[in-house]
């Protein structure tokens, strides 16, 4: 198999139309057998539930070429389970776990020539998603749904190296108490767009959202979980019912405890204590972990000792170890790596 002739380091984090994608439809109470299609377009009724009431959930994961030349995915079973949980919360029929894994495998195999080579810093981003496809005019769940999975190659997230970010404490709320902040649905990301644009206008890279109930505790950004490092090398990550349970964060905590021998704590993190931490990072599929150098709270600057020039030493070790697991240069825990071909 010959890889696509692309400048992998220059393709950016953008959408590229690849060979095939997977489609399955839910109708009359059951999912059809589904299959691959070359058609990248979707035709919907003007009154489709996704267009009227935003019934949609999605996932994001990656395929990699390992040091041995294998094409693998990283913990796709957890993506499948999280998507099932998201669907239930949105009153949508869950797409079965084994079928989710099969769809991912079919799509990656069918687009194997788009999987970037080892050492390029690039990867194949995979986007499974599901939406209401039948017409709905009254406010209620739709009766028909479509599950799809496509993929696109993406370049290195940190082009030229990871530069620490500057965040601002947002005046907006990302999620409501007892709402949908803990599921991966498009509506949650739509909620963060205005705040994201406003932060960029003011020269910040991202927002730090606080808990919507008391605006006292750190929650997450628009698309990533926080991870803090104490001056005693303890990993602390915020705990909240309205935070998306990040698979990357979950994996990072395991790496910190079982590979690096660090103490790991999940608890509420007060805004007024973050200046006591030595390092800060944002965990997510796209970048794995992004270093944070500074947080601005309405004019008050909180600077982490790790600085604004590079990743702090602990964040760097976490990044190197987890990416090593994904690329096959570090032994993986059992079940973390799913070989495709």
Image (cartoon, helix red, strand yellow):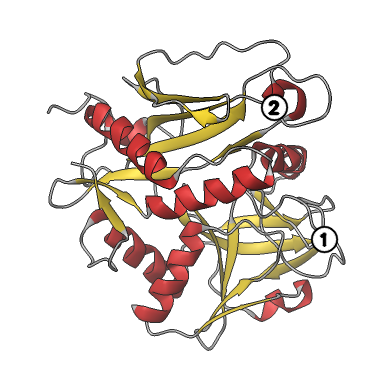
Q: Is residue 311 above or below residue 1?
A: below
In the picture, the quarter occupied by the N terminus is top left
In the picture, the quarter occupied by the C terminus is top left
At x 50%, y 63%, the residue is 249
Local crowd size for mark 1, using a 10 Å CA cut-off: few (<14), some (14–19), many (≥20): few
* Dot 2 or dot 1, earlier in sequence: 2
Q: Nearer the viewer, residue 307 or 270?
A: 270
How far across and down, in percent of the image, does residue 11 sit? 37, 30
- Residue 273 shown left or right of residue 266 in the figure: right
Q: Determine contact: label 2, label 1, CB under 8 Å.
A: no
Kindly state the secondary structure of the residue where label 1 is placed: loop
Q: Which of 140 and 61 is in front in this view?
A: 140
Q: Given the current orientation, which residue lies at the most extreme right position? A: 214
Local crowd size for mark 2, using a 10 Å CA cut-off: few (<14), some (14–19), many (≥20): many
At x 26%, y 37%, the residue is 116
Question: How many dots with numbers?
Answer: 2
- Residue 22 shown left or right of residue 93 in the figure: left
How far across and down, in percent of the image, does residue 210 sit? 77, 61
Q: In this view, does 245 lie above or below 49?
A: below
How far across and down, in percent of the image, does residue 306 sit? 53, 72
Instruction: Inspect this view and state whether residue 65 appears.
Output: yes
Instruction: Inspect this view and state whether residue 287 appears.
Output: no
Kindly state the secondary structure of the residue where label 2 is placed: loop
Residue placed under numbered mark 1 in the picture: 299
């Amino acid at each position: 198999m010959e890889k696509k002739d692309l400048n992998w380091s220059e393709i950016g984090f953008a959408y590229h139309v690849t060979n095939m994608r997977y489609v399955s439809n839910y109708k009359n109470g059951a999912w059809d057998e589904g299959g691959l299609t070359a058609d990248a377009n979707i035709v919907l009724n003007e009154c489709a539930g996704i267009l009227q009431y935003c019934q949609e959930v999605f996932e994001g994961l990656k395929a990699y070429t390992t040091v041995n030349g294998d094409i693998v995915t990283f913990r796709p079973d957890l993506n499948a389970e999280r998507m099932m949980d998201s669907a239930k919360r949105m009153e949508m029929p869950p797409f079965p776990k084994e079928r989710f894994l099969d769809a991912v495998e079919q799509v990656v195999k069918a687009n194997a020539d788009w999987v970037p080579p080892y050492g390029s810093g690039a990867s194949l981003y995979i986007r499974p998603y599901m939406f209401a496809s039948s017409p709905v005019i009254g406010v209620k769940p739709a009766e028909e749904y479509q599950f799809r999975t496509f993929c696109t190659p993406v370049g290195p997230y940190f082009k030229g190296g990871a530069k620490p970010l500057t965040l601002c404490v947002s005046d907006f709320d990302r999620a409501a108490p007892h709402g949908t902040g803990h599921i991966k649905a498009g509506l949650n990301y739509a909620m963060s767009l205005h705040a994201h644009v406003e932060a960029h206008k003011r020269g910040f890279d991202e927002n730090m959202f606080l808990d919507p109930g008391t605006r006292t505790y750190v929650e997450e950004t628009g698309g990533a979980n926080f991870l803090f490092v104490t001056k005693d090398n303890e990993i602390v990550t915020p705990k909240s019912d309205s935070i998306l349970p990040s698979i990357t964060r979950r994996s990072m905590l395991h790496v910190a405890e079982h590979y690096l021998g660090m103490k790991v704590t999940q608890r509420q993190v007060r805004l007024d204590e973050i200046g006591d931490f030595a390092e800060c990072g944002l965990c997510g599929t796209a970048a794995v972990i992004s270093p944070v150098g500074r947080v601005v709270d309405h004019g008050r600057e909180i600077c982490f000792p790790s600085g604004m020039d590079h990743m702090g030493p602990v964040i760097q070790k976490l990044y190197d170890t987890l990416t090593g697991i994904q690329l096959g240069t570090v032994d993986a825990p059992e079940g973390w790596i799913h070989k495709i071909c």
